Image: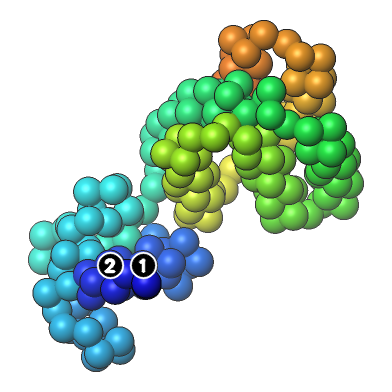
Amino acid sequence: MAVAVSKAEQCYEILRKGIMEGTFAPGHRLVIDQLVRDYGISSVPWREAVRRLEAEGWVDIVRNAGAVVKTFDTGSWERTMQLLARLEGYATALSAPNLSPEDLERARTLNKEMAAALANFEPARFGALNREFHQLLCSRCDDERLAGLVEDEWTRLELIRRSAFWYAPGRAHASLAEHDGLVDLIEGGADPDMIETAARRHELNTVTAIAEHEAQLAES
């Protein structure tokens, strides 16, 4: 028997999907009256949904403006990367013993496809393949809550990049080499702590590279 979805949950899903897909871009005002007219749902569920999105960090309530889709900055990106590094490191370590030879072969294929995208100057494809690579390595962690947290932070990361994308020169190539090293560890049956450390360090290396690149730009 299907469970009825509340109006507030419907509103939440509409707004969250719109934010994820860019319909409601960073800085977009979520006008309750307009949402009521567009979707035929009364204002109370919309307000509940907005409060939930605010609590989750997707929306800011701005004085005299109302609900505004959050605009992310460098600090937000770094905080998200720090959290993702820890969550994903743990999820990868839990997943590693359950990854099949076919999973690992797929991971290597994805990494080769990323290298091709990089050579062909296809940053959007590179980013999509990178996310798929990381999702695959976490996919067998058998912890739905942890998997959901990892997915949320990846989504947040993509939104931040959409509002202000930047990348340190050379970091993408180094990232591919680290991917190969991570798959090698998993394939070789390395200790879970070693895998977790390697996965976490991989994400944090990007944070370090960006910080160093920005410092160089500031000095020039």
Specify the amino acid type for callout 1. Glu
**Left or right: 99 with respect to 208?**
right
In this view, the residue in front, 160 or 192, is: 192
Q: Secondary structure at mark 1?
A: helix
Specify the amino acid type for callout 2. Glu
Which quarter of the rendering shows the N terminus?
bottom left
Q: Which residue is mark 2?
A: 9
- Spatial CA distance of label 2 from label 1 is 6 Å
In this view, the residue in front, 125 or 170, is: 125
144 lies above or below 60: above
Q: Position of residue 206 (x, y in %)?
A: 61, 27
Q: Which residue is mark 1?
A: 13
Give the residue displayed 27% in from the left and 56% down from the top: 53
Q: Position of residue 132 (x, y in %)?
A: 69, 46
Question: Cβ–Cβ below 8 Å for labels 2 and 1?
Answer: yes
Give the residue displayed 48% in from the left and 67% down from the top: 22
Q: Is residue 150 visible?
A: no
Q: Quadrant of residue 181?
A: top right
